[in-house]
Image (cartoon, rainbow, N blue to C red):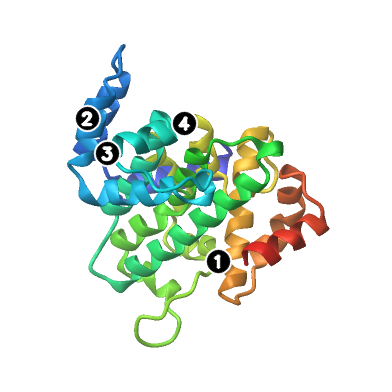
Amino acid sequence: MSDPEIFVTSQVLDSSIQIPSPPTLLNELNALLDAPDVNLKRVAELLARDAGITALLFKLSASPAFGGRKAAEGIDQVISLLGLSTVADLVRGLLLRASLYGNSPFYAWFWERSDEIAQLAGAVAAERRNFIRLPPGHVQMAALFHDCGVAILAARFPGYIDYFRQGAGHDYHWPRVQEADACFNTSHAVVGNMVARHWKLPDYVCEAVRLHHDNDIADRRVAGLVATLQLAGHLQRLRAMKSSEAWEENKASALASLEMGEADLQDMVEQLS
């Protein structure tokens, strides 16, 4: 970690920002998964207690990012189709969204954007699976966690949301978030990394959350995941007909990490944007 990052991290720790703890459901799920002999029936019964989680797991199990299989008939079949580790990854992301929600319309807009980026990231990873080989659950989870610091900072600093407002009312846009961070001596990427580590995400996913604005990353797996998130964010902005300055800054390194050329990029833009 660089000196500026160490300084920002200390600022975050001194600013009384509350990092959400993993919900009871996730702690119970982790306990079941850590058992020497995992009981699939007990895992299914645990997840079935949360109707919202199970409904979203059913939906995701049939999505193209996870092979486009036909809809499962029961939660036990979802677990069999996706695998325990993937289900655990998805549950973490879904519970995070439930934990970071407020009364402001900003949060509905924020999570709608995050969900769209998660879908696009899954599509990018599926398209480039022969080159980057990232588990679909990790991609989905990283996409939901990588900007979660924004939601936490919006709750901690009332003026933070103002940087996302577009005109009057409840219209929002995605700014250069680092500029908003700088005004509050903080970093949404550092906060997101703290959440990811507190929720016990894989180390390389935590690093991708911390570095998702960077373009010079030594670890190949982290670089591939960051590039996937960056391209997904670019595609989301294209769908919204917005410019993407950050993409222009990261484009060369992202395409290199994904082993893509300009023609590959154009094909993906035409397919997904």
The residue drawn where x is 59% and y is 36% is 134
Amino acid type for the residue under numbered disc 4: Pro
Mark 2–mark 1 distance (CA, rounded to whole Å)? 38 Å
Who's the residue at 32% across and 43% down the image? 73
Which is more N-terminal, label 1 or label 4? 1
Residue under circle 4? 202
Q: Nearer the viewer, residue 151 or 121?
A: 121
**Mark 4 against mark 1, which lies toward the viewer?**
4
257 on left or right of 228 = right
Residue hosting label 3: 22
Residue 215 in picture, x, y percent from top left:
68, 48
Q: Secondary structure at mark 3?
A: loop
Give the quarter of the figure containing the C terminus.
bottom right
Q: Secondary structure at mark 1?
A: loop
Circle 1 is placed at which residue position?
176
Q: Amino acid at mark 3?
A: Pro
Residue, disc 2: 28
Of the numbered discs 2 and 4, the one sitting upstream in the chain is 2
Residue 80, position as x, y percentages in the image: 39, 31
